Amino acid sequence: MAKMHTPAMEKIERKNAKRRKPKRSTPATEAWKRFKRNPTALIGLIVVALLLLIAIFAPLIAPYDYQVQDFMAMSQKPSSAHLFGTDQLGRDIFSRCIYGARYSLVIALFCTIAAFFSGGLLGIIAGYFGGKVDTIIMRIMDIFQAIPMIMMAMCIVAVLGNGIPQLVAAIMFASMPTMARNNRAAILRVRGCDYIESSEAIGVGQVRMIVKHMIPNAVGVMVIYFVGFLAVSIMMMSSMSYIGVGLAAPTPEWGLILNDGKAYMTQSPYMMLFPALCIMVTCFAFNLMGDGLRDAFDPKMK
Amino acid sequence: MGRYIVKRLLLLIPILLGVSAIIFALKTVTPGDPARQILGNDATEEQVQAKRDELGLNDPVIVQYFRYIAGVCHGDFGESYRTGEPVLEELVPRLATSAKITLGAVAIGAILGVLLGVISALKKYTWVDSLVLVVSMFFQSVPEFVVGLVLIMIFAVNLHWLPASGIETWKGYILPMLTIGVSSIANYTRITRSSMLEVLGEDYIRTARAKGQTESKIVMRHAMRNTMIPVAQSIGTHLGNALGGGMVLETVFSVPGVGKYIVDAITARNYPSVLGGALMIAIILVVINLIVDISFVVIDPRLKTTIIAGGAKKPKKAKAA
Amino acid sequence: MSENILSIKDLVVHYETDEEVVEAVNNISLEIGKGEILGLVGETGAGKTTTALSIMGLLPAKVGHVVQGSIKLEGEDLLQKSAKAMRDVRGKKISMIFQDPMTALNPVKTVGDQISEVILLHEKCSKAEALRKAQEMLAKVGIVPERYKDYPHQFSGGMKQRIVIAIALACEPELLIADEPTTALDVTIQAQILDMMRKLQKERGTSMILITHDLGVVAEMCDHCAVMYGGEIVEYGTVEQIFDNPKHPYTKALYRSIPSLDQDVERLHVIPGMVSDPSNLPSYCTFCDRCEEKNSHCAEHDPWIVDVEPGHWAKCFQYTPEWEGGK
């Protein structure tokens, strides 16, 4: 009902008529609804899902073994036999890139989980307990933050040596201050909210408060950090591999493949083009997805 | 104001002590013997021992650490294991190179980013807005070294306009600057856009409209300066990040800057150089942040009182709405 | 009423978003005489500010729409004017004082700049001259002119509102719209600001629309009063008529909800129910659901305006002669 009908109202009424029964709305379903409406976020999600499939089924998709050197087909331009061409040792770059997805995604996942359990946990502890604990943890993090992330990671690789676990440890350590800071802020934000204070005021129990109020509200932000950090670790990993302090050859890591192609940049630019594209697409997809998640979980933040 | 600056600079001391302690700790646990490294595999065990004594490596770590700190207090950052030259003398010219690139890059990023951010905010929710955001985000999400490599492929390998590496001529600076600058556009665009949108919703913008002011002048005279406050804040962070990111990028472009110096030092286990570089970067970061904070006063007169009084560094964020 | 400076006729303003249409102002007509102060009273969300913004042509872009009606300033329809022509009207012919002086001034510009800006826009004069005029204005609103170099954060709330008033009056507008000018201020400061506004208004013969939810302010300041509810004007008359002889059930309820000093009451009178949801207004009388004097007709038809005495009307079926038929 209304005082005066306008075309705009009719449009909305038509829209409402089409809409099915309202479902139970939780923060998660609300967020998913907003996420779905965001085309760039959806593209990001689809690409990430595709990458996951590629990583899982890499042996089925890759036409060649990523290690096999074919001296009859060295430094070949892209063709139907070798989609992305071959490198100076005759290895199929397409297969190497496909397997690269495996390495990049798995290592990134490990890095992110490790970062959450180290820096993230420190931040949560600092934010939750506050006071002296908070001050001590955050002052130490300040010192760590004065060392650039990549330098820290490189120093740790220098201590531990090359390899996947070492790389994960290095990235975990290097990201500690940022992780701690972000997670602390997330906890503080939830703690400072009026509804937490009002629940406290009406005597909601500690456990109920953490389970019912703080976790659901902090989870949104943490999911955002999680996805965001996946992209950061892929970036760091490939950067480090490229300058020779990440993984060791012949691992088909995208940064390493790029490094392999570096010497042949002038004659065979495709050797660098395809792994570079892989890194670009992956990082972009993760960021699009992360961005969409941020808008979805916190529409006000935009 | 003076007291505020001194207070901020004093905060440097624990950070520098901490940073050097961390690097020192890493140095002691790194496998390999620096003395052996310097002398090579041909040296006899006695020679190595003599070198270790000379470098003070046989003393307890704590003693080494405090000897180093004492040296730093006198401006002695130690000698490079590799060249035997004082680290400080090696660092200073490299610092100048890095500073040029970083400043140029930040200028490119900030100018383009702010411009795009303003356009994006004024055309919000149109295709222009979406395009600007997606494109700038693309450059942000791609690792800098990949952007650098792509630029090398285009401008150096294909077009032969610019050198792929080195900084023998001024042309050599362009690609590294462009790479760091382009990668940071998204950051500025985003901050400018959201800041501008927020400012345009403020009551004083409505006041300006009620005066009969034109939209373009409202943006230029009333909104711009307020919009720039968070942007200026991010310039400080960006300068820091650019210095850190410079490590990979200077390697990509073979630029003899601090970043490449540190990367080479780490790979060669040349710890005096690593330590010197790390301390230098830490000092620069703290000083940059200080300069940025002080420059706020110029943009936002409200902060003058808080800064001079030595109060909170930034106005406290309002409670979550 | 001799000559009308502003006349609003059948104004309907909607806010349209993808989710809903908010009927903010519904078919209101108003006239304001030269040199007169009109009080616009109502609860939050009654459409007072929307009415003011429509007059200024400052409805939020893309969302706010004038669906029908006209707003004539000295015979010229403001709604038909181009954006450029409206810029010449704003600040020069009609000025507006906003609710919150804390946020109404640009924090990074000196107050002198902010006052002289409006002078430079509408009067042909040099920067120095405008600045001199700005200082004069500061003196007029009771601030030391030398403080023109200061920034807004160096002033208190009441002083800021004085500056906002100085900006609004700098070009001697014919109509001043004051949107709750004292709501955000301390009670003691409120009286000072109102006094000053009335003094300046009398001096210059400016017409004024005073938006407020404070009936005391209306009684003190205004000549006429319009009571708004649910985007409609439900009662209009001179201040005396409205105060001595309120007709509409809503106006009456408003009076009852004012705490009385000479009577000891247990509880304050509360108007039952909630303010009507402006995105879902009934097609019948908007106030019906909360009305204490409603009749069966009220839930079926929308009442129309009826004169209850000369210059005093109400929008209620009680005063309709055809009450019986409900038509």
Image (cartoon, rainbow, N blue to C red):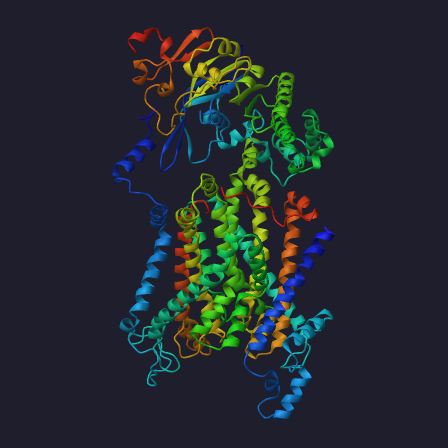
Observer-nearest residue: A64 or A81? A64
Q: Can you see residue C75?
A: yes
Seen at 31% across and 78% down, the residue is: A65
Q: Position of residue A172 (x, y in %)?
A: 48, 66
Image quarter of residue B220: top right
Q: Position of residue B210 (x, y in %)?
A: 55, 31
Image check: A126 left or right of B273? Answer: left
Check the image and report above or below for C56 versus B234: above
Total number of numbered labels? 0
Q: Can you see residue B167?
A: no
Check the image and report above or below for A69 versus C37: below
Where's the N terminus of chain A, which quadrant?
top left
Seen at 63% across and 24% down, the residue is: C188
Check the image and report above or below for A50 versus A219: below
Image quarter of residue B222: top right
Q: Position of residue C263 (x, y in %)?
A: 52, 13
Image quarter of residue C219: top right
Image check: C144 left or right of C4? Answer: right
